[in-house]
Amino acid sequence: MSTLKHLVPVPVRQWLRSRQKAAQKSLIHLDRVTDWSVLRRVQPYRPEFGGRRGQYIDRFYIEQFLAAHQECIRGRVAEMESPQYTQRFGAGRVLQSDVLDINESNTLRTMTVDLARPEEAPENLLDCFLCTQTIFLIRDYAAAIRAAHKMLKPGGTLLATVPGISPRVPQSLVAGAGEDWWRFTARSARLAFGAVFGEDRVDVRSYGNVLTTTAFLQGLVQEELTQDELAYNDPDFELILGIKAVKSASA
Ligand SMILES: C[S@@+](CC[C@H](N)C(=O)[O-])C[C@H]1O[C@@H](n2cnc3c(N)ncnc32)[C@H](O)[C@@H]1O
């Protein structure tokens, strides 16, 4: 078979591979879960958050949270790992956009900061820090919150998200540095961020419901749920927590 493969010119092989990928993609919609009885199982319907079958369910809530606070994404903004949300939600208000990471192989990085070492973090620099899906990867999460607070200018805003109910994130899916250490509840997030920013400067909201949480755990994707199902909020099912924390103007 491998001998035969070499008889096919490289451009033809590339074309065949692209056709194969396109055919696989066009078949994805045939494998949408509509009959929920298939979820009576002890292993998830699809491992690893459903792979690349569609958009992850937690992203619906992360983006809903950022959209709700987009007016805070302004001035000098730093975002973890890439500028995707700065560009999407801060358009027209952002004067300087930075990408913060400890991971030196991240070519998008413009600021190298170890959030676990607040003593080394720059001070009073940012109007807004977008810290999505990161603090739970840092063993000393309280240090990371202190670093975020230190980097903000007085009156600056931290917009952070952390998982509430989620499968363990395997190391192969942790982009860059860190390990899956923590899960939060709305109550514990309020306590942790309130201890650094002050209780009255922290606003925590949970996102999710029993259906979306179940679907997320089973590796289903946004495309398998309706917009109404995704948007329904039940505070007893905390799939994602969104934390808005504002540094005191007199800090
Ligand atoms: C899973 S990504 C999350 C950010 C991404 N934009 C998102 O919302 O999915 C986590 C990022 O945090 C970085 N990271 C992990 N530990 C860190 C630390 N102690 N200091 C700074 N960055 C860290 C990782 O290298 C990675 O770029």
Image (cartoon, rainbow, N blue to C red):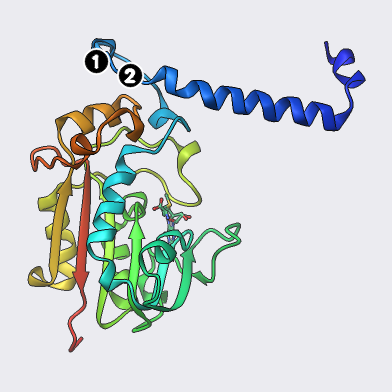
Q: Residue at x 15, y 47 (%)?
A: 185
Disc tally is: 2
Give the side of residue 246 with respect to residue 93, left or right: left
**Residue 246: x and y, percent?**
20, 74
Callout 2: SS: loop
Callout 1: SS: helix
Q: Residue at x 43, y 50 (%)?
A: 178
- Are the two marked residues, 2 and 1, in contact with CB atoms closer than 8 angstroms? yes
> Taking 136 as reference, is 113 above or below it?
below
**Residue 110: x and y, percent?**
54, 71
Q: Quadrant of residue 165?
A: top left
Give the side of residue 143 with respect to residue 27, left or right: left
> Taking 55 as reference, is 75 above or below it?
below
Residue for badge 1:
36
**Residue 56: x and y, percent?**
37, 38
Rounded to the nearest angstrom, the CA distance separating label 2 from label 1 is: 7 Å
Nearer to the camera, 62 or 238: 62
Residue for badge 2:
33
Nearer to the camera, 1 or 187: 1
Q: Amino acid at mark 1?
A: Trp
For the residue carrying disc 2, how many other residues have a C-alpha within 10 Å: few (<14), some (14-19), or many (20+)?
Answer: some
As drawn, which residue projects farthest toward the right?
7
Give the quarter of the figure containing the N terminus: top right
Q: Residue at x 35, y 18 (%)?
A: 45
Question: Any atom of ligand 1 within 8 Å of the CB at mark 1?
Answer: no
